[in-house]
Image (tube, rainbow, N blue to C red):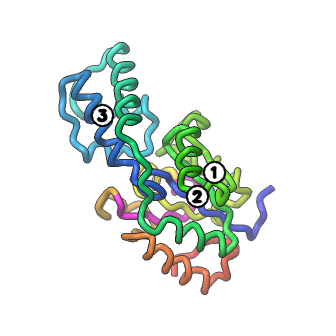
Amino acid sequence: MADAERRGVALDMDGVVIDGMQFHVRAWQHAFREVMGVELPALEVYLREGYKEDYFIGQVAEKLGISVTDEQFDRIHDCKLAHYDDIFYLDPVPDIHQSLSLMREMGYALGLVTGAKRAVAERALSEMGVRQWFDAVSGSDEVSRGKPDAEPYQKGGQELGVLPQNCLVVENAPAGIESAKKAGMLCVALESSLDKSYLTQADKVIHTHAELQDWLREEHAITGGQGPWQLP
């Protein structure tokens, strides 16, 4: 049973904890170019950040007006993963360590809710040296319905043992914001990948982790760091 006062913070990974979207964009573009002979605009990838890979391919194919056979689908998927592994390197979002440290100091349970697979998230957090700060990690391979469905953040909140209204979500993409709001959680969006005009469903849009830290301190001064999150 969830503690009625305990708080949690659930963070997306790419664009919030690590700057991984740059590699996803390049890998998806490479895969669609190699397999389908089409150019995939970067914006179409950023707008679908957090989607499960099978859903992503179908959505992008429809947007581009192309048909993808089962064989091409598998080739796109495999080509993307291979190219991503070839080009990826760990690139933490600036000031993320300070944000995580502050959240822990304030007594908040921390969770990671990502559209990547659990093993990928575990490796990234371990390489950053912050895995021990997280109470729960949830990947796309652990839910039946990915973002923008509510299931990912519902699962994240349950694993943290906090009520939805006591769980703050830090996101940077429309699908993740929608997932958080459907789960009944307050959502702060980081303007790391997309302009704020694409993040209007969030309760608040911020530019950097330094600004997030200022907001956390302001909110904590009002609420004492317990119970439902509030907008200062």
Number of other residues with Cα within 10 Å of mark 3, as a class: few under 14, some 14 to 19, many 20 or more: some
Residue 93 x/y as whole percent = 42, 61
Marks 2 and 3, how far apart at CA: 27 Å
The mark nearer the N terminus, 3 or 1, is 3
Residue 195 x/y as whole percent = 29, 61
Q: Which residue is mark 2?
A: 10
For residue 151, say whether it is visible.
no
Residue 88 x/y as whole percent = 39, 42
Q: Nearer the viewer, residue 185 or 225?
A: 225
Q: Which residues fall within the magenta stretch?
A: 180-192
Q: Nearer the viewer, residue 179 or 44?
A: 44
Q: Name the mark nearer the viewer: 2 or 3.
A: 2
Which residue reaches farthest right? 1
For residue 104, say whether it is visible.
yes
Q: Tell me what residue is drawn at x 45 percent, y 54 percent.
A: 18
Residue 146 located left or right of residue 29 = right
